[in-house]
Amino acid sequence: MDIDFTRLKYFVAVADELHFKRAADKLMITPPPLSKQIKLLEKELGGPLFERGYHEVRLSPLGQQLVGPAREILRQVEDFKAAAARGVSGLVPIRVSATAYAPSDLLAELETAISGLPVPTEFSVPGSAAEVTAKLIAGQAEIGLIHLPSGDKRLRHRVVASYQGGIAVRFDDPLASRDLVSIEELRDRDVAIDFARPNPVVLAGLTRMLNRRGIHRIVRTTNQRGGEVEMATQVFNRHLVAVVSYAPDSFIGKIFSPPEFKLIPIDETTWAPAEIALAWAPERVQTRLGEVEDMVERIAERLGPVRRGA
């Protein structure tokens, strides 16, 4: 089976946005050719990648199964191109990896900031902050974008964004009529924090903080790493409350969007905002430490002041 890499790129873009128009805008094409290419890919694969509703687009079971491998294939293609470029130029690039759980607008601005650096760069979005941290520690990336706390003392950080906490609930949940909630209001509810499961440090920290606030009914909704779609399904079917970042433009924010869900900010006096930072491992970049730290500052300057809110 011959798979067109462009169609894989289109598939991942729609999977990221869960919206054909937004994905088309991101790809700088119009929706009709995007839809056509997705249908051709579905025909090649023998099944639908998306479940299309009047107001929504969701990954099908086949789509959920293939989106991870599709990302990996595209990453390998980019690695191949970068290796070829290095062979021609002889220059060693700065490799930047970012967590896929950061808001998509921040990821887009990060990619733009990196492309303007005066050195060759490679940009990848491998998955969770834990996966990015592993790449930094293994020397497979020089700079990473991760959620704090990382729990790894081998890393240094430069905070570039701060996002208010939020909850996601069904459209008919008693809390759905609210525009702001306090974390203590969740004491009698079943709460899901599975978005943090790929990072054990963040998961443990969130669990402790919730317990200190009197919230002990923390439930597991998925066995998958990054099973956000399954988590949303469980939140809907079981009337759970998902504690997330209040970032409507993020992947999580788009999953928990109307009309099925409502995303509500948490009062910051009851729940501290989440921070996102550029990180690097000095011991792994010893020979390039000055260059890497200079690039971190350049990227931070291009991103502007520490971002607040959504």
Image: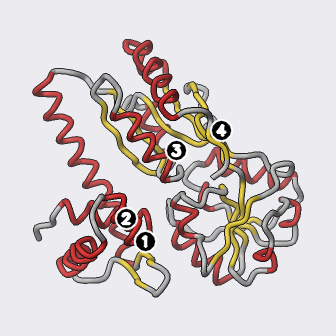
Nearest to N terminus: mark 1 or mark 4: 1
Where is residue 123 shown, x and y percent of the image? 34, 40
Q: Label 2 near label 1: C-beta < 8 Å?
A: yes
Nearest to N terminus: mark 4 or mark 2: 2
Amino acid beneath label 2: Ala
Q: How many numbered discs, if any?
A: 4
10 Å neighbourhood of mark 3: few (<14), some, or many (≥20)?
Answer: many
Q: Which residue is drawn at 49% across and 27% down?
A: 280
In three-dimensional space, the C-alpha distance between marks 1 and 4, rounded to whole angstroms, equals 31 Å
Give above or below for 73 relative to 143. below
Q: Nearer the viewer, residue 152 or 159?
A: 159
What label does residue 149 carry, if any? 4
Q: Residue at x 36, y 62 (%)?
A: 25
Q: Which residue is under mark 3?
A: 130
Question: Mark 4 against mark 2, which lies toward the viewer?
Answer: 2
Q: What element carries label 1?
A: loop
Question: In which quadrant of the rendered view does residue 60 lie?
Answer: bottom left
10 Å neighbourhood of mark 2: few (<14), some, or many (≥20)?
Answer: many
Q: Which of 36 and 12 is in front in this view?
A: 36
In three-dimensional space, the C-alpha distance between marks 1 and 3, rounded to whole angstroms, equals 27 Å
Where is residue 309 shown, x and y percent of the image? 67, 49
Q: Label 4 near label 3: C-beta < 8 Å?
A: no
In three-dimensional space, the C-alpha distance between marks 3 and 2, rounded to whole angstroms, equals 26 Å
Q: Which residue is under mark 1?
A: 19
Q: Residue at x 76, y 80 (%)?
A: 173
Question: In which quadrant of the rendered view does residue 81 lie?
Answer: top left
Nearest to N terminus: mark 3 or mark 2: 2
